């Protein structure tokens, strides 16, 4: 794979942990534990490949409604992950960021997150963004509230509101839109993930469950991406002038 063709921003809906475990007669939490291993491996691999931004959907605003034991198990796995990964992130120059209503997370998780974010701030090997307690509708509503507040205090005229204002108030401000969105475990839906940001993102759904998503599977997804022609509403000829047959980024 040539570095030039690697997507700048890869986002992943890491789905299928629970089914992976159930198929093996294991408790769902064992699927999440296996999934955490995949997170470590895929993060390191993306860094090696030269991906600049990796966003992982780890816990949705709707996931709070799962049984209490599953939610607390996930929070405890998140704590372990943050404690264990700090050194690896630093070694690989990876900056940790989050999107989502992280104020809803337990205090101990928030404290660990703050510490790792602080320790990795400004590292420029890759930005790893974890979507935690994340819901795209909630993120958009919070952005709209912030814009309305600017209008109310006279800092912004209604007629001047543009996409850039919304973008500036989203949790993802400062990170370019994803180029490629991968969903594991086969569901053909977005599940409230980055609705604004994926307007022109290439989608890739694989039946493979997240715990089984290996480096080779990521290679397959990237190879598929490289065969796409991104047209952004234009014609094929416009985006692929002579010499650039596929109009790839
Ligand atoms: C994704 O796996 C992880 C989270 C949503 C936290 P799931 O737990 O949704 O696994 P399935 O979809 O039930 O198999
Ligand atoms: C999406 O998966 C959320 C995460 C991967 C964290 P879900 O399992 O929650 O989505 P649905 O319920 O199948 O749409
Ligand atoms: Mg699921």
Image (spheres, rainbow, N blue to C red):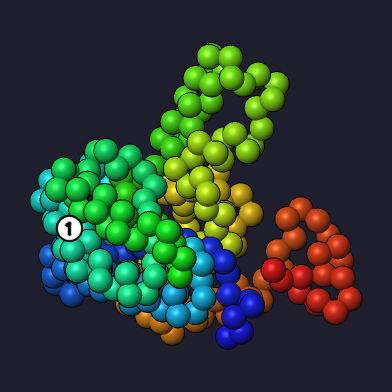
Identified at 64% across, 54% down, the residue is 200
- Provide residue 127's location: percent of width, then percent of height: 44, 62
In the displayed structure, 165 sits above or below 199; it is above
Q: Nearer the viewer, residue 105 or 220?
A: 105
Quadrant showing the C terminus:
bottom right
Seen in the image, is 197 located left or right of residue 132?
right
- Provide residue 3's location: percent of width, then percent of height: 59, 80
When asked about the image quadrant of residue 135, the answer is top left
Q: Nearer the viewer, residue 10 or 182?
A: 10
Identified at 20% across, 53% down, the residue is 112
Quick one: which residue is furthest to the left in this view? 69
Q: Which residue is mark 1?
A: 79
- Provide residue 63's location: percent of width, then percent of height: 27, 46
Seen in the image, is 6 located left or right of residue 11?
right
**Which quadrant of the frame does ligand 1 lie within?**
bottom left
Seen in the image, is 211 located left or right of residue 50?
left
Q: Nearer the viewer, residue 125 or 213?
A: 125
The crowding category of the residue bearing disc 1, from other C-alpha atoms within 10 Å (few below 14, some 14 to 19, many at least 20), is: some
- Provide residue 131's location: percent of width, then percent of height: 37, 52
Quadrant showing the N terminus:
bottom right
Please tell me whether mark 1 sits on a helix, a strand or a loop: helix
Asked if one can make out residue 224 in the rendered structure from this viewpoint, the answer is: no
In the displayed structure, 19 sits above or below 140; it is below
């Amino acid at each position: 794979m040539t570095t030039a063709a690697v997507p700048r921003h890869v986002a992943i809906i890491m789905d299928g942990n629970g089914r992976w475990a159930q198929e093996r007669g294991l408790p769902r939490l064992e699927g999440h534990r296996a999934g955490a291993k995949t997170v470590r491996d895929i993060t390191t691999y993306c860094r090696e490949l030269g991906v600049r931004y990796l966003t992982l959907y780890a816990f949705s605003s709707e996931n709070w409604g799962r049984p209490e034991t599953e939610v607390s198990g996930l929070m405890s796995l998140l704590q372990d992950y943050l404690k264990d990964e700090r050194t690896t992130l630093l070694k690989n120059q990876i900056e940790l960021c989050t999107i989502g209503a992280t104020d809803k997370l337990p205090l101990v998780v928030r404290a660990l997150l703050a510490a790792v974010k602080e320790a990795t701030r400004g590292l420029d090997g890759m930005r790893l963004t974890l979507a935690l307690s994340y819901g795209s509708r909630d993120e958009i509503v919070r952005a709209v509230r912030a814009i309305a507040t600017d209008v109310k205090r006279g800092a912004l005229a209604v007629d001047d509101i543009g996409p850039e204002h919304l973008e500036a108030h989203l949790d993802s401000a400062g990170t370019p839109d994803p180029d490629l969105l991968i969903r594991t475990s086969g569901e053909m839906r977005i599940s409230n993930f980055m609705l604004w940001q994926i307007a022109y993102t290439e989608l890739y759904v694989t039946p493979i469950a997240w715990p089984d998503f290996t480096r080779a599977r990521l290679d397959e997804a990237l190879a598929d991406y490289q065969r796409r022609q991104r047209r952004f509403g234009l014609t094929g000829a416009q985006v692929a002038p002579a010499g650039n047959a596929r109009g790839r980024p």
